[in-house]
Amino acid sequence: MAVTRTKKNTLVAKLAELFASAKGTVGATYTGLSVANLQELRAAARICNVTIKVAKNRLVRVALSENDKFKSADTSLLTGQLIYAFSSEDEVMPAQVLAKFAKSHPELKLVAGFDGSGASLDTLTVTALAELPTKDQLRGQLVSVIAAPLTSFLAVANGAQRGFTQVVSQHASKI
């Protein structure tokens, strides 16, 4: 059954809205995945505030052309059956969600992406994005780097007190 023009227009409007609000978007091939696998992917993506959409590439191109910042984006990599992941909060999260899912489901392959400024990203760039640490991991690393000198100082300061206490306790046990 063919999709009506009004449904296509509604889908294009929804896609245009997702592209406009997204900080990062990634497309991946999903040929060979079952419906249950796609539901599992959607559930994992929902936890990370990532929206998953399946749409025809032609409709995605129309949605991109409706937005001024995506008009000059290269869409040549958008071929075959693609699933799109959008995030309006994090630039890297769509690539990470899809890459994490692809580790257990090799049928899913990252293809292309778009950043919030409208630039298109090739497969290598999207794969590199997927390997970056998350914002929470980066925050944790930053806190550990900031706290390292203080931790070392406290270890040195406590070492002197610990040594003094051991000497006093050994001397007291001899008395």
Image: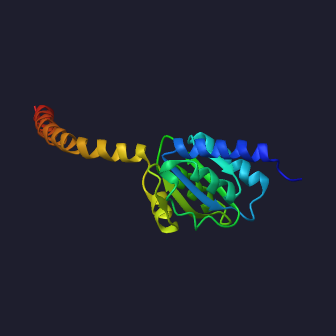
Q: Which of 7 and 37 is in front in this view?
A: 7
Picture coordinates of residue 43 (x, y %)? 67, 44
Picture coordinates of residue 132 (x, y %)? 43, 56
The relative height of residue 45 versus residue 96 in the rendered view (above or below) is above
Quarter holding the C terminus is top left
Figure colour scheme: rainbow
Farthest residue in the right direction? Answer: 1
Residue drawn 44% across the image and 50% down it: 117
Residue drawn 56% across the image and 47% down it: 19
Q: Can residue 41 be seen here?
A: no
Q: In this view, does 138 lie to the left or right of 79?
A: left
Residue drawn 54% across the image and 47% down it: 67
Q: Can residue 170 be seen here?
A: yes
Quadrant housing residue 111: bottom right
Residue drawn 41% across the image and 45% down it: 135
Picture coordinates of residue 46 (x, y %)? 62, 41
